[in-house]
């Protein structure tokens, strides 16, 4: 493993800041929980919420993909609903389904259940896990990423009560009762902000904001009902003048029509799904002069044979063209059927294949 002095930024952090790196950093969304046999072994004995509540165990599973795959970043093992569970909401992570909420939020009165998150008491285990993982990674060229669910994606679960495709009740609330919607989004924004700040304070070197289901919205609805809240979340995570900025990664799926609006709301790194060619998406956002890009291999490619997988990975690398500010990742999470050998080979391949000589920055007018 490459050793970096502690005072130096890791390769991943340099890429987030659009600085040149010796190789393109790679990590994979859901790199721990979906495909690793050693994670499945732990899950046989503990539920995910039990793992999250035990810092030693949680630190261990967070480090599993670092050890096995050699990725450039660890992401803390948790779930986007964890802060909501911590403030007392009854949410179950149902096997094969996802988050299921005992009392879906539908009225102003229901919002009482969403009390503010108190960092001193409501995220102790999370902070202890972060500190433990940072200690383990000291001197290694591996960064630690914290994360939060974005208010829209969290609201989707809370209002529908379970995973949804169409978000009918959620969108109807947005359209019919915008006051209620704004009150809900404001509370979720506040919780996400406190939770993210608490993670940074405990050692997270970047924060990814998962707005996984925001692609369900039209640009008009996003601009009116979601973007202002996202703007407040990212502003709240911007470092005071003169202090180094902890990189903020802004990610969503199905966001081809929303990219500019999302970037306007905030983010030092924008996550692209596989539906947008990486070079086109990057150019639309102002290129490598303006923003870093994370993505965007189709997770299905990782279930294919090596020849097919390599071809898809090469396409992503060719489009990124070793411009400073590319973090290799998937367009969404690792699929449960992914052979673990493919994960290992992909990480090694991206490290070996990059960088090629850097071309001029991809800017406006290209
Ligand atoms: O590598 C990892 O797996 C890291 C840990 C991790 C992360 C980053 C988990 C564990 N969840 C998440 C984030 C998360 N959770 C997101 C954002 C990322 C994404 O878009 O994939 C979302 C939308 C959720 C909600 C969620 N939790 C779902 C999706 C349901 C749906 O709407 O389709 C599911 C299935 C869960 C449960 C869950 N979270 C994580 C695990 C390992 C599991 C499986 C349940 C378990 O093992 O008990």
Image (cartoon, rainbow, N blue to C red):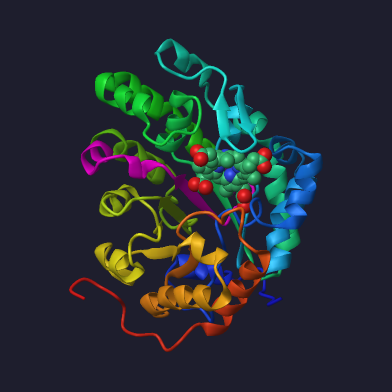
Residue that appears at 58% across and 79% down: 349
Residue farthest toward the front in the current orientation of the protein: 305
Q: Quadrant of residue 331?
A: bottom left
From the viewer's side, name the closer residue of 185 and 297. 297
Residue 362 placement, left or right of 207: left
Q: Quadrant of residue 175?
A: top left
- x and y percentages locating residue 350 in the rendered image: 54, 77
Looking at the image, can residue 132 be seen? no
Residue farthest toward the bottom in the current orientation of the protein: 357
Residue 81 placement, left or right of 259: right
Instruction: Find ligand 1 in the image and state its quadrant.
Output: top right
Quadrant of the rendering where the N terminus is positioned: bottom right
- x and y percentages locating residue 99 in the rendered image: 56, 32
Residue that appears at 50% across and 60% down: 299
Residue farthest toward the top in the current orientation of the protein: 109
Residue that appears at 25% across and 73% down: 363
Residue range in magenta is 198-223
- Position of residue 105 relative to residue 366, above or below, is above
Residue 165 placement, left or right of 350: left
Looking at the image, can residue 113 be seen? yes
Residue that appears at 35% across and 59% down: 275
- Position of residue 99 relative to residue 284, above or below, is above
- x and y percentages locating residue 303 in the rendered image: 56, 64
Q: Quadrant of residue 351?
A: bottom right
Residue 301 placement, left or right of 253: right
- Tell me if residue 213 is in the magenta stretch: yes
- Tell me if residue 364 is in the magenta stretch: no
Quadrant of the rendering where the C terminus is positioned: bottom left
- Position of residue 260 relative to residue 48, above or below, is below
- x and y percentages locating residue 128 in the rendered image: 72, 44
């Amino acid at each position: 493993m490459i050793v970096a002095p502690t005072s130096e930024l890791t390769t991943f952090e340099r890429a987030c800041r659009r600085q040149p790196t010796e190789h393109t950093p790679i990590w994979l969304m859901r790199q721990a929980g979906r495909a690793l046999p050693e994670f499945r072994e732990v899950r046989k004995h503990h539920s995910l919420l039990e793992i999250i509540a035990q810092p030693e165990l949680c630190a261990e599973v967070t480090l599993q993909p670092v050890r096995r795959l050699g990725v450039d970043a660890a992401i803390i093992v948790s779930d986007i609903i964890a802060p909501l569970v911590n403030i007392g909401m009854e949410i179950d992570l149902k096997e094969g389904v996802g988050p299921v909420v005992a009392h879906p939020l539908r009225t102003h009165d229901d919002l009482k259940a969403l009390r503010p998150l108190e960092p001193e008491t409501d995220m102790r285990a999370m902070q202890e896990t972060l500190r433990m993982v940072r200690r383990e990674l000291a001197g290694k060229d591996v960064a630690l990423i914290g994360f939060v669910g974005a208010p829209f994606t969290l609201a989707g679960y809370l209002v529908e009560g379970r995973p949804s495709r169409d978000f009918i009740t959620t969108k109807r609330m947005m359209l019919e009762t915008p006051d209620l919607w704004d009150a809900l989004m404001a509370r979720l924004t506040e919780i996400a902000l406190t939770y993210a700040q608490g993670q940074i304070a405990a050692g997270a070197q970047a924060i990814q904001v998962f707005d996984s289901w925001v692609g369900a919205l039209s640009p008009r609805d996003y601009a009116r009902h979601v973007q202002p809240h996202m703007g407040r979340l990212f502003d709240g995570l911007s470092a005071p003048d003169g202090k180094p900025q902890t990189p903020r990664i802004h990610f969503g799926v199905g966001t081809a029509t929303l990219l500019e609006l999302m970037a306007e709301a905030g983010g030092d790194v924008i996550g692209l799904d596989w539906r947008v060619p990486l070079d086109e998406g990057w150019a639309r956002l102002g290129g490598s002069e303006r923003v870093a890009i994370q993505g965007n291999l189709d997770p299905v490619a990782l279930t294919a044979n090596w020849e097919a997988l390599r071809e898809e990975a090469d396409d992503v690398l060719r489009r990124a063209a070793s411009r400073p500010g590319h973090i290799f990742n998937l367009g969404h999470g690792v699929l449960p059927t992914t052979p673990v050998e493919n994960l290992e080979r992909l990480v090694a391949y991206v490290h070996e294949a990059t960088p090629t000589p850097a071309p001029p920055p991809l800017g406006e007018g290209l």
